[in-house]
Image (spheres, grey):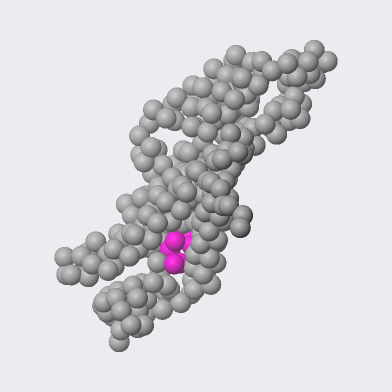
Amino acid sequence: MRRINGRMMTAALLGAAVLFLFVITVAGHMYAEEALVTDFSRKDLSPGGAYIFGTDWLGRDMFIRTLTGLSMSIQIGILAACVSSVLALILGVLAATMGKTADALITWVIDLVMGIPHILLLILISYAFGKGFKGVVVGVALTHWTSLARVIRGEVLQLKEALYIRAAQKLGMSQLKIAWKHMLPHLFPQFLVGLILTFPHAILHEASITFLGFGLPPEQPAIGIILSESMKYLAMGRWWLALFPGLLLVFTVVLFDVAGESLRKLLDPGSTHK
């Protein structure tokens, strides 16, 4: 019988996490309309039986609402993380390849963004773009690129000292062509891991500003909206309105973190013989 090593276990863990997140996203999208259905004959039911997460004060199924909210958060997180990571890749490469002026300017912007309290900057950008789906995506995308940009900039600065990069420069290749043909393939693993690890931050911050009232509108069954509304009813003993959505949000964020760490280990050449 073939022995299962750590690398195979890591790959299996990555696959399970991705599959679970995919199922949540698809299921939430499929039941988006059902999450809005109200039925006062079943309002304020505690968990059990036909409603495993219970129902709220309007008789809405909390399990379906939670799935729909998580699905929306995942979609926003994926879109915002992709935009943010591409921005980080472009600016990180430009900072390290386009001379001291470009490096100083981009580094100054990175320090400026990182120097402002994160949630405050996110709220301001989201509010400036009209809140809602567009405002949240733009706000998250423009506030999560700095750390990855620094990592990519450092990688490119190291690559510039490699012999094959210097040889390409001696042959007269432009900086952008060298970055495209010789640097991007090397940077792809760091970019991919950084992209996945940005997802949990994007999801949590989307839920945070929506909870505070600066994100998605109240009529959408987002996790932030669900948790915000549930605060009014906790004192009445309706603990399930906040407990299960909160636990699933944390579980989803942990899964994204597990997927990112698993991918990092798989892309690490040192783990080949483990």
Residue 32: % across, % down: 49, 71
Residue 59: % across, % down: 32, 79
Which residue is at a point 60% across and 22% down the rendered structure image?
Answer: 95
Could you tell me if residue 130 is visible in this image? no
Q: Which region is colored magenta?
A: 67-72
- The image quadrant where one finds the N terminus is bottom right
Residue 197: % across, % down: 50, 43
Which residue is at a point 35% across and 39% down the rendered structure image?
Answer: 120
Residue that protrudes farthest toward the right in the picture: 171
Q: In this view, does 152 lie above or below 99?
A: below
| Side of 120 where 106 appears, left or right | right
Q: In this view, does 165 lie above or below 138?
A: above
Which residue is at a point 61% across and 19% down the rendered structure image?
Answer: 157
Magenta: main secondary structure equals: helix
- The image quadrant where one finds the C terminus is top right
Total numbered labels placed on residues in the image: 0
Q: Which quadrant of the structure image shows residue 172?
A: top right
Residue that protrudes farthest toward the bottom in the picture: 41
| Side of 226 where 161 appears, left or right | right
Could you tell me if residue 12 is visible in this image? yes
Q: Which quadrant of the structure image shows residue 268?
A: top right
Q: In this view, does 1 lie above or below 239?
A: above
Residue 204: % across, % down: 40, 49
Which residue is at a point 44% across and 26% down the rendered structure image?
Answer: 112
Q: Is residue 219 above or below residue 167?
A: below
| Side of 172 where 214 appears, left or right | left
Q: Which of 220 and 200 is in front in this view?
A: 200
> Is 250 covered by the magenta stretch?
no
